[in-house]
Image: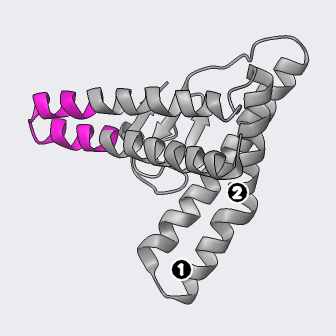
């Protein structure tokens, strides 16, 4: 594949992923405001964007085996936790931008947790076994992720356990 084509496929993949995430977030907001059909429309279009992104991942050769996909995710989460968010946190601090500072900090803390979960998954895959997981809970406010029962309050943002979603 020519470099320019690959670059444009990568840009298209990024845009489709952004759109999917944005539309799912918009669907939640529409549902909160009582617009169930608009929410369904957002979700429907988000699903279409997901199909596009899957196609572009395949064309880029970036949809591998579970082990290959885990390795990518593990490296990506490490990069975000160790380099990406710390640099954004530092920039927001220098600019005295408190809300982004808090957002980058909570994201960085969560990426560390994701890294550990992906490491466990990789260990299981390397042993030829599926990962053993109990319930996973995510704070709907900051993304704090934990396996097991949620604490009385979120370890990152302090909101009550009712703010956690179970997976």
Give the secondary structure at mark 2. Answer: helix
Q: Residue at x 70, y 46 (%)?
A: 2
Q: Residue at x 36, y 28 (%)?
A: 48
Q: Which residues are magenta?
A: 24-43
Along the line of sight, the residue nearer the viewer: 36 or 72: 72
Is 29 covered by the magenta stretch? yes
Q: Residue furthest left?
A: 34
Along the line of sight, the residue nearer the viewer: 162 or 68: 68
Q: Residue furthest front?
A: 2
Residue 126 seen in this snapshot: yes
Q: Give the residue pinned by disc 2.
A: 81
Q: Give the residue pinned by disc 1.
A: 92
Residue 83 to residue 48: above or below: below
> Position of 121 compared to 84: left or right?
right
Residue 105 to residue 19: above or below: below
Give the secondary structure at mark 1. Answer: helix
Q: Position of residue 63 (x, y in %)?
A: 68, 27
Is 90 covered by the magenta stretch? no
Residue 116 seen in this snapshot: no
Q: Position of residue 13 (x, y in %)?
A: 53, 42
Q: Residue at x 76, y 20 (%)?
A: 65
Q: Earlier in the sequence, mark 2 or mark 1?
A: 2
> Position of 45 compared to 143: left or right?
left
Q: Position of residue 106 (x, y in %)?
A: 55, 59
Disc 1 residue crowd, few under 14, some 14–19, many 20+, Cα 10 Å:
some
Q: On the image, which quarter does residue 33 sit in?
A: top left
Classify the position of the N terminus by image quarter: top right
State the separation of the CA atoms marked 2 and 1: 16 Å
* Magenta residues, dominant SS class: helix
Residue 105 to residue 132: above or below: below
Q: Number of callouts in the render? A: 2
> Position of 19 compared to 12: left or right?
left
């Amino acid at each position: 594949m020519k470099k320019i084509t690959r670059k444009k496929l990568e840009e298209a993949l990024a845009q489709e992923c952004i759109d999917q995430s944005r539309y799912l977030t918009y669907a939640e907001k529409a549902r909160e405001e009582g617009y169930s059909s608009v929410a369904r429309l957002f979700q429907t279009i988000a699903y279409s964007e997901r199909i596009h992104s899957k196609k572009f991942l395949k064309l880029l050769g970036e949809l591998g085996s579970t082990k290959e996909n885990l390795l990518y995710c593990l490296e990506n989460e490490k990069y975000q936790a160790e380099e990406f968010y710390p640099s954004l946190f530092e920039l927001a601090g220098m600019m005295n931008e408190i809300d982004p500072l808090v957002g980058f900090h909570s994201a960085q803390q969560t990426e560390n947790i994701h890294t550990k979960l992906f490491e466990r998954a990789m260990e299981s895959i390397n042993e030829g076994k599926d990962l053993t997981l109990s319930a996973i809970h995510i704070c709907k406010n900051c993304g704090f992720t934990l396996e097991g029962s949620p604490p009385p309050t979120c370890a990152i943002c302090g909101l009550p356990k009712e703010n956690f979603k179970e997976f």
